[in-house]
Image (tube, coloured by chain):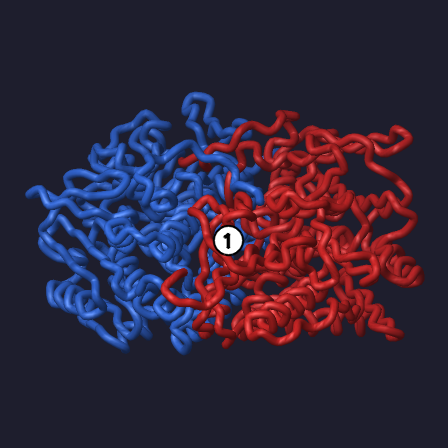
Chain colours: A blue, B red
Amino acid sequence: MAGSEHPRIVIAGAGFGGLQVARGLAGAPVDVTLVDRHNYHCFQPLLYQVATAVLSPADIAWPVRHILSRQDNITMLMAQVEGVDRAARLLLTDRGTIPYDFLVLATGATHSYFGHDDWAPYAPGLKDIEDATNLRRSILVAFERAEATDDEEIRRRLLTFVIIGGGPTGVELAGAIAEVARHSLAPDFKNVDPRTARILLIEAGERLLPAFPPELSTYTHQRLEAMGVEVLTGRAVVDCGADHVTLAGGERIDASTKIWAAGVRASAAAQWLGVEMDRAGRCRVGPDLAVPGAPEIFVIGDTSAPPPELGPIPGIAPAAKQMGDHVASVIAARVAGRPAPGPFRYRHAGDLATIGRNAAVVKLGRLQLTGFLGWVFWGLVHVYFLVGARNRFAVAMNWLWNYVTRQRAARLITGDLSGRSPAGRGETGATPTPTSPPSGS
Amino acid sequence: MAGSEHPRIVIAGAGFGGLQVARGLAGAPVDVTLVDRHNYHCFQPLLYQVATAVLSPADIAWPVRHILSRQDNITMLMAQVEGVDRAARLLLTDRGTIPYDFLVLATGATHSYFGHDDWAPYAPGLKDIEDATNLRRSILVAFERAEATDDEEIRRRLLTFVIIGGGPTGVELAGAIAEVARHSLAPDFKNVDPRTARILLIEAGERLLPAFPPELSTYTHQRLEAMGVEVLTGRAVVDCGADHVTLAGGERIDASTKIWAAGVRASAAAQWLGVEMDRAGRCRVGPDLAVPGAPEIFVIGDTSAPPPELGPIPGIAPAAKQMGDHVASVIAARVAGRPAPGPFRYRHAGDLATIGRNAAVVKLGRLQLTGFLGWVFWGLVHVYFLVGARNRFAVAMNWLWNYVTRQRAARLITGDLSGRSPAGRGETGATPTPTSPPSGS
């Protein structure tokens, strides 16, 4: 992290945006330090497949060090960002401070409960590998507990799964859980029939997948219902507890497993910098994605709020990667003394969401695909964008195996059952307790 | 678990022994309940490959329900065994009591620290999936922390790995960690050279692999040294702390990561039953593997101590499976009113241990293999005994990929970094603190 006279570029976050900045600076006369709290880059679009036991964490996550191992000008540091000292030009982390000449914050987003943070333990979201394995545990444990109970009311509650939020993540989770229950688990249980599981997808807005054309929303709605998912649109959740959710109008749904897919809130980048943020907590930046008044600090990806004149920029991987490309070229130009490129321009390639076996929706310019074609297209795109030949091969093989057998390879209940997952003790009605190590035998 | 007049067979433990009893009762007119604290059967012989990032947990673990889904007379219950009420014939679990007509305890073994249980947090062992992912985290975090520190003494300590115990598990771990450091990680670090990591294998006895012929022990010793492992035989560990071990004679070795592979202690089966146990805590049973005076209770596998006249029975998977076969046939005969088979007879097929790339030792009757041939044989045997075509394929593909690229597919640091793993904060010298959830960002 020292020893040369090159400008020091510090990148916080090894998601799609941060990684792209690092790659874009390959060969440039700079010293890059990439900081992330994990040692891996996670392919978030397939997290729901880890949560529903199709893929293993290692299939969609890859050590950042290895991704960048051929790039000589990069140092990787596993640390948690805690703040920025703008006057001294230091990134503050739990492993020490890192001096920078240019700083790129690409620290992403987390779940937003819209002022109801007390719902978080009952309706966890899906943003990283830990979330995914926790959710996988909740879902699988619910069926195990249902098999073991003789109380019909408890069994109903354990076999009710509520997904809150009808965007791509909510749609994908609802479809995948329906397939787990109806096909993968159904043959293996004796006392309960997993096909009787109730899966509800609740969306406060008027339709699912609001970013897609209305006819694709309608298609998605119908496909999910055909798969046995109860889709409730125009219904807001007004309360959420250990064993239930309540909808606007007062309807109460008893459910051990609730999953939050309704909103995201930016990371604390704006607070670290002490700059203005938008309603979602994102940092307001200029047309070059730099912080106003601090041309050496850039904010990209889900934690960045570019000016409205750049047009709408969705919180998806391609947008983060394009911002990363742009910032890398701005930094490279400035370091070389060349004129900086013009303002950032977002090019929207399209929208994709999968619903289930043989069903996905794709919107690319004027092209719209549904059904089997859309599903194959969705699969090819996702395999293509995975990092590394090994992951592409492993994911493709897992999908093939899952397609042929309808089995799920990663049906493992791992980690703590003592209360971090509300479903873990759902039938006792106990509230979550502090985490303790897994009990030995 | 009720509703018929068939004898109720309750099996505690879904390891090699318990699973074999369940399978052996397929088609018999009995109601079997199989209880395990996990929902999966774990292929323990390959756990060290999860710990060293070659395989993912799902590659070596398989849902018990699915393994037995075609067997109509079995119910599976995920629960932790807490005791046995012999008078009422009930198995006591954290999910309720289960009545039995025949009980089979196959609850395995855990680590034994020979009276030094206070060493357990500093030198964890390797018995289940959680142990393996925790150990994987410790090893990978040690390299990450070494990369980030400027203090040479701390770096040395972080890059010192001590494996205590020179049986097959210790040998396999030492060889695998040497390969991780020297080949997989070496290209990816900038500030430290992972090839400088010090890997020590400490065995209190006179030679490694005491169950093998002496010439294979010598071969193993030499191969490990050629791979860069320091092998210390005839050296006992007399103290173990957060950052060091001390050997008999007073030599102190500073090391952040210590791994315990030195001994096992049986599960609490003997205490649950209130019967006599041997020095390793195993239940003394009769020649038919039933508890003396309780012909309806059997104890098998690592938690069973058959009478000495049956000859030595090692704590390995084939022994547990053979005991499981025997008990299934005894129960089936008794239920059918047929004469029970004779006493249990253990047939020792052989011993295998892998050292590293192109090196393993095999002893099958008069056949001894080493080097590449032994290594290929070891791999074929392990793939063959894995449960399920998917796991065989996934493991074989991971090995092929690892062999060709020397990369490790599952290099993920997951779970809690706040102190459960001594290496997690090794360089601060902090003692382990109670577990807390992973910190968010």
Quick one: quadrant of the N terminus of chain A?
Answer: top right
Residue B4 image position (x, y, % from top left): 39, 67
Residue at 28% from the left image edge and 53% from the top image edge = A155
- Residue placed furthest toward the left: A249
Image-based side of B256 in relation to A261, left or right: right
Residue A202 image position (x, y, % from top left): 17, 52
Residue at 75% from the left image edge and 32% from the top image edge = B240
Q: Is residue A65 visible?
A: yes
Q: Quadrant of residue A187?
A: bottom left
Q: Quadrant of residue B69?
A: bottom left
Residue B105 image position (x, y, % from top left): 60, 55
Residue at 26% from the left image edge and 42% from the top image edge = A243
Residue B60 image position (x, y, % from top left): 57, 62
Image-based side of A357 in relation to B159, left or right: left
When the figure is inspected, residue B91 is found, relative to residue A397, above or below; the finding is: above
Of residues A376 and B391, the one nearer the viewer is: B391
When the figure is inspected, residue B36 is found, relative to residue A86, above or below; the finding is: below
Of residues A431 and A354, the one nearer the viewer is: A431
Q: How many marks?
A: 1
Of residues B186 and A340, the one nearer the viewer is: B186
Residue at 65% from the left image edge and 56% from the top image edge = B299
The kind of residue on which mark 1 rests is His
Q: Residues within 10 Å of mark 1 (few under 14, many from 20)?
A: many
When the figure is inspected, residue A416 is found, relative to residue A143, above or below; the finding is: above
Q: Is residue A44 visible?
A: no
Q: Chain of mark 1?
A: B
Q: Report which residue position mark 1 lands on.
A: B38
